């Protein structure tokens, strides 16, 4: 049996769901294939919250955040759902921080994004919940926001299905053949599918799909952990009382005000071990929780005790830049990879990947291409601290 679609998307986390939605709203027939159940917790699109912010380490990323805010706004308008909760964002650079503050301020200045630099006294005057060491500089950007993770992914799946997309859960890809101008053949379950182009958003399983084309990219999968804390007075940590924050050092931490429940969520960035996504566990790591809790006790002393922790995955290229490009030698196969910080750009990923699949754009950026040194030079030294 062979079924035919204009386009197919492999992987229905946030990026794949956004791509399926973008393709269907343009009037195309779309197949979506997910190897697990929709909304599963084995990847990087589940749980409650993610950060949306302008502050980034290069002008190219800052420019892309402008597009992301616009794309989230369009998604809100088209769905009738409120998705963006503005709380303000505070990047905290301690003295001799491992992450250069000048990269962030210079990138914001280059794109014309207003921001403030605050010392610990000024920060305490605005948000007395913080207790910061002398010499810390806070980079404040008022548009820092929270977007929902699992709910937004489910919404984009619903919108795609509403426009006619066929979404199959528990349907792993078992074969893939590129027939060039004749399209791409995808085998999954007992069915063969033919499509004009294929978009791969399989995250930790990207190389499993690309292996059918004889192509691999250097990726490391890490098992991360987020923890929820219960403050004695949740009103002091409400969205209108506390900004989201990122501790810009090594180790790096980040956190949110209360969002949807009277708890404060925080996590370490790139703090977990490298794992095999097929065999890794999901039990919380007490040592990771203890490290984070110690930081929270110092920096947000009223945030309370940890009440639960959960695991998620990062899938990291050596430079931690996105992959948004056609597979070399296979122009009908497009890959999207968020590198552990892509959720805030999910609607934008969907739009850009749809542009590539349909041929409306030939390329996106060399920074996100397959031929950059991090993906081609075996001697490239990995750096995930950005």
Image (tube, grey):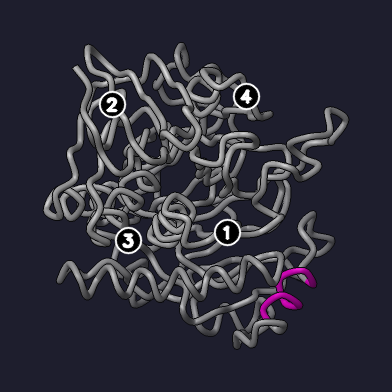
Question: Marks 3 and 1, Cα distance to the nearest angstrom?
Answer: 16 Å
User: In front of the other: label 1 or label 4?
Assistant: 4
Front residue of 325/169: it is 325
Instruction: Give me the residue at 30% from left, 48% from top.
Output: 20
The local secondary structure at tag 3 comes to loop
The residue indicated by pointer 4 is 215
The residue indicated by pointer 2 is 193
User: In front of the other: label 3 or label 1?
Assistant: 3
Instruction: Tell me the crowding category of disc 3: few under 14, some 14 to 19, or many 20 or more residues within 10 angstroms, Cα based.
Output: many
The residue indicated by pointer 3 is 258
The residue indicated by pointer 1 is 299
Q: Earlier in the sequence, mark 2 or mark 3?
A: 2
Pointer 3 with pointer 1, Cβ within 8 A: no
Q: Earlier in the sequence, mark 3 or mark 1?
A: 3
Question: Marks 1 and 4, Cα distance to the nearest angstrom?
Answer: 45 Å
Where residue 171 appears, x then y in whole percent?
26, 21
Highlighted range, magenta: 102-108
Pointer 3 with pointer 4, Cβ within 8 A: no
Q: Residue 54 lies in what quarter of the image?
A: bottom right
Instruction: Give me the residue at 76% from left, 45% from top.
Output: 372
Q: Earlier in the sequence, mark 1 or mark 4?
A: 4
Which mark is drawn over residue 23?
none
Instruction: Tell me the crowding category of disc 1: few under 14, some 14 to 19, or many 20 or more residues within 10 angstroms, Cα based.
Output: some
Q: Residue 249 lies in what quarter of the image?
A: bottom right
């Amino acid at each position: 049996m062979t079924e035919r679609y204009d386009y197919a998307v492999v992987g229905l986390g946030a990026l794949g769901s956004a791509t399926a939605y973008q393709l269907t709203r343009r009037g195309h027939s779309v197949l979506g294939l997910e190897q697990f159940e929709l909304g599963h917790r084995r990847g990087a699109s589940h749980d409650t919250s993610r950060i949306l912010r302008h502050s980034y380490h290069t002008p190219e990323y800052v420019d892309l955040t402008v597009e992301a805010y616009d794309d989230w706004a369009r998604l809100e308008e088209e769905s009738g759902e409120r998705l963006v909760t503005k709380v303000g964002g505070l990047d905290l650079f301690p003295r001799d921080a491992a992450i250069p503050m000048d990269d962030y301020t210079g990138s914001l200045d280059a794109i014309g994004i207003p921001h403030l630099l605050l010392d610990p006294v000024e920060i305490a005057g605005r948000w007395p919940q913080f207790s910061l060491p002398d010499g810390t500089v806070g980079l404040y950007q008022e548009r820092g926001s929270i977007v929902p993770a699992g709910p937004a992914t489910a919404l984009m799946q619903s919108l795609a299905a509403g426009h006619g997309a066929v979404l199959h859960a528990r349907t792993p890809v078992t074969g893939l053949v590129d027939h060039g101008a004749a399209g791409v053949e995808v085998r999954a379950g007992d069915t063969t599918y033919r499509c004009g182009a294929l978009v791969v958003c399989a995250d930790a399983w990207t190389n499993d799909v690309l292996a059918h084309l004889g192509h691999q990219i250097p990726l490391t999968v890490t098992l991360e952990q987020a923890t929820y804390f219960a403050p004695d007075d949740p009103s002091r940590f409400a969205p209108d009382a506390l900004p989201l924050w990122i501790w810009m050092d090594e180790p790096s931490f980040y956190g949110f005000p209360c969002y949807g429940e009277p708890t404060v969520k925080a996590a370490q960035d790139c703090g977990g071990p490298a794992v095999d996504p097929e065999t890794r566990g999901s039990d919380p790591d007490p040592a990771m929780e203890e490290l984070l809790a110690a930081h929270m006790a110092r920096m947000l002393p009223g945030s309370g005790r940890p009440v639960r922790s959960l695991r998620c995955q990062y899938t990291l290229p050596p430079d931690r830049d996105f992959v948004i490009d056609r597979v070399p030698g296979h122009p009908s196969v497009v890959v999207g990879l968020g590198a552990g910080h892509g959720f805030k750009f999910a609607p934008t990923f969907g739009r850009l990947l749809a542009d590539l699949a349909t041929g409306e754009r030939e390329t996106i950026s060399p920074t996100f291409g397959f031929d950059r040194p991090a993906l081609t030079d075996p001697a490239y030294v990995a750096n995930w601290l950005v």
